[in-house]
Image (cartoon, rainbow, N blue to C red):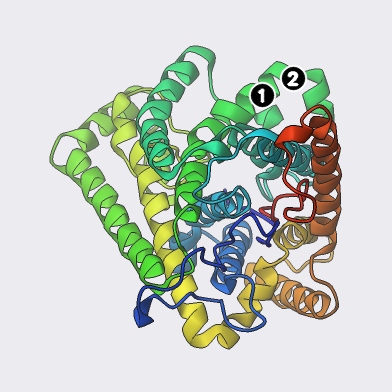
Amino acid sequence: MAQSTLERPEVVAPSIAHACEPATPPASPTDTPLGSGPGQRRITGIDAARGLALLGMMVVHLLPAYSADGSLTLPWSLSVGYASALFAVVAGVGLAMTSGRPERMVGRRYAAASASLAARAVAIGALGLLLGFVVPSDNALVILPYYAVLFVLAIPLIRLSRPWLLALTVGVVVLVPAASHLWRAAHGGMSEDLVNPSLWTLAAQPGEVMSLLLVSGAYPALAWTAYICAGLAVGRSALALRSSAAGIMVLGVALAAAASSASWFFLERAGGRDALDSAAAASSSVSTELDLLSAGAEGTLPTNTWWWLATDVPHSGAPLDLLLRIGVALAVLGGMVLLSRAVGGLLRPLTVVGSMPLTMYTTHLLLLVQPWMPSDPVVAFLIQLVALTALAWVWSTYFERGPLEQVVRYLALAASRQVSAGTSVGHRSHAQPRGRHRVGRAPAQVF
């Protein structure tokens, strides 16, 4: 369970507003743009939020879920399900920052952005499938192939306005979990042989792998589209303003509280808990039920009763789980944006790690499988924490992007320019005057 977004937003072109560069002047002293001072062209709180998500992913992969008395450990409770959702929401924010924010993308701009996003999906997916060869599912569930599918699904979404994105978020939250329940009841759940798909399994079983990535896997892309849509909607807002960041934080807290309260009501007052107990007893899976309700799922829930969809089980893809994780992600994102203004220097360790998340995530997975890593989980966690922070800190001193981020950006830029050059032929009358816009730049780093 856990993880990921990986690449930091950057300014694409003068014609595309960045959240760190508001299109309109601040309305009041309280609406001062965050991160808009001299030398700042980004909202560093977004990097810090992504770094925090990476930290949560490491907690889930390395630290024990249960304490000696059988209760969940606090680090696990604060990380499971939340870290991966935060990654996805921040990925949506990054996509919004590079797709024109309030403006609807059309023509050459949309074609170039689509090609760039597709190239990113191919690069990230290929890396994830390669990691599937070396990372056992007992160590980690690799998220990159799922993110590749999510980025492909996001191609039509980057054209949508905020109202449409909000409506689509609600639609996905309500409809996709029910459709997934029906599909998995008829076709079965995740195959153990495909938990971490590789290039070999994709070539040998393409249909099964795509079903895994879309519906039945650890990070089912169809349900996770809700996170991308929510992030896109937030990115269409003036996130650089204090008032907007504070409003997003408050909205997130309210949404999380409402989702958690609704789940409690359905389970404890509307008979859901009894229905789950009865279904578990009938299928001899009482211990599985208890584990799911406490420690979380691996992407999906059992299909023996519809009452599972009334839970907010972490990492389950149930409607209230999606709403709860979206709420917490918004609260963390808004809080980090505000906190970065107040004590930005103290967030530097999180910021440098979050500025190159693809490199950090991949390095973390490779360290997980090294035979020389200590068996003590706390020691292993501390070693990785120090090593990744030091690596990111030193690298960011000399380079703007992480090594893997730079490779992905190069491929995305090449695809964008190729499509832009092709679509410009025969459409000269619709082109912008030379020098006013740099068409064909790759979207900002979103993973």
- Expressed as whole percent of the image width and height from the top left, the position of residue 173 reads 38, 35
Confirm or deny contact between disc 2 and disc 1 (CB under 8 A). yes
Instruction: Identify the element where label 2 is drawn.
Output: helix
Badge 1 is on which residue?
Answer: 210
Residue 322 lies, with reference to residue 51, above or below; the image says above
On the picture, is 287 further left or further right than 85? left
Of 314 and 63, nearer the camera is: 314
Residue 13 visible in the picture: yes
On the picture, is 337 further left or further right than 48? left
Of 237 and 350, nearer the camera is: 237
- Expressed as whole percent of the image width and height from the top left, the position of residue 239 reads 46, 64
Residue 73 visible in the picture: no
Residue 10 lies, with reference to residue 440, above or below; the image says below
Question: What amino acid is at disc 2?
Answer: Pro
On the picture, is 247 further left or further right than 44? left
Badge 2 is on which residue?
Answer: 206
Of 322 and 295, nearer the camera is: 322
The residues tagged by marks 2 and 1 sit, at their Cα atoms, a distance apart of: 6 Å
* Circle 1 crowding by C-alpha within 10 Å: few under 14, some 14–19, many from 20: some
